[in-house]
Amino acid sequence: MSLVEEASRDASPSRARERREQLATQLPRIVEGLIDELSAESEQQRRRLTVLRRSDIARESHTAIAADVGLSRSQFYRDLHEARELLSDALENRFSPAGVQRDSSDPRFLAIEALRSGGRFDRARALASTLARHADAREAIRALCLRAEVELELGTFAAASSSVEHARRAIPHVVDEGSRRLFAARCDLLECEAAHGGGQPWPEARRNAALEARRRDYRAGDSRAAVILAKALVEEASLRFERADDAALPTIEEALTVVEDARVDDVRLLIDVRVRSSGIRALRAQHTKAALDEAQQIVAFAERSGDVRGLRAGTQMVAGHLLTLDRLEEAKRFALDALYLVDIFGSSLDRVIVLSNLARIDVHRRDGAAALRWIRAARAIPSDAFTIVQALAITEIEALVLLARAPQAMARARGLEPRVRAWSRLTGRLKLAQAVALEALGAANEARRASAEAVEHATAQGSPLLRRRALELDVKLSGNSASRRTLRELQAALSA
């Protein structure tokens, strides 16, 4: 019999709740005991568990721990990764059917989260699947939604949609109406994210209706609705950002207000909101340096809280802002740090994203060969992430031009155009890549027209990086005085 069956066979809802509360009280003592047991096995294991205890329990700075223990940055993260795996295995064994009293199924959810945080996504997904098969309706929905979240992190969007569909089928079997409504809201959110990731986002009317429903739940005073609303707002802001929609900024500001007013303590969500806020604010050139400061604060917060996922996301955002500010060598160093964290703790999708960012940085460094190496590495990883795949293709076009392969680049650009038409930010990047390729081909008139279109797109979508590059090319090709004046103003704003 599974742990879930053992836990729930005789339990009434009130008794199950009492058991969960007992576990919540006992768990810190259990974790400390396991760390002591594991530390006694060897000197190397003691060092690793010391790193984990100070990082994940005492919430000390990663930099300070590494210095005190005498570890390099890379060895510190290797030790932390190994320690989290050791503790995850020990928790899983402690709460397995053979080794646990019949008191709660919640340890399995804790184990799933521990596996996920430690970068063991396949095992997290497998454990969630096992739990879903043997649980009652309420816990099966939780497990399936958690499995969908893991699948979204892996970039397997069709699988995530399937998990959500299975979760929806169990909702009618939940007795409490309020819980049914919240489960349905969580399913809506995950389905919306999966559709977006696969390049087929929900229509605006459907997204707006779902958001308004989440706002009503939140205004009704249900504290659980705050997290779902904030996540839905982050998802909506992300989509509007990719489509160069001005509503991205007020949407992420609403998410910030929700997490602050509701005093949300979900570290993962808090960092997601802050990272997206930093990216959107940087669309205004005069705010790019402030956005960089915000991203650096995210990195510091993630280090203090022991959240490696947040550290990776913050590090990537720092790299992006440094790229906008034309601080290319610094940008590459931060992107390489993010890649190292992904190698240990990240998913396959995380790796594709970081490799894509590195390729773009190397294009700006005018190292086409290095950019193509990153692109080949990214393409060796299966990915259904629509916008990332298209962004890689645009970066490849730019790299080919740098390597004097402009005819091939232009052919790729023409083939890509229909696929990115609905995505304004990608379209702007593609227009600029086409202009660069046309210049390399010696098609001066066409290149000037394309550069003017690139300036128009970049101005409309507000990206300082794209706008600066488009203006520089337009000045070079046409000597346009208006573009030259606008470029000087943009450079001044970025330097302020």
Image (cartoon, helix red, strand yellow):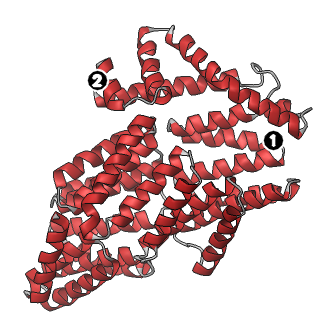
Residue at horizontal 15%, vertical 76%? Answer: 489
Q: Is the N terminus in the top left, top right, bottom left or bottom right quadrant? A: top right
Residue 490 % position (x, y):
18, 74
Residue at horizontal 14%, vertical 84%? Answer: 483
Residue at horizontal 69%, vertical 34%? Answer: 108
Q: Looking at the picture, tell me which residue is in the foreground, 360 or 293.
A: 293
Three-letter code, disc 1: Ala
Q: Secondary structure at mark 1?
A: loop
Residue at horizontal 46%, vertical 48%? Answer: 348
Query: Badge 1 is on which residue?
Result: 135
Residue 437 % position (x, y):
20, 77
Residue 446 % position (x, y):
19, 90
Q: Is residue 322 left or right of residue 96?
A: left
Residue 14 % position (x, y):
87, 38
Query: Badge 2 is on which residue?
Result: 67
Q: Looking at the picture, tell me which residue is in the foreground, 392 or 463.
A: 463
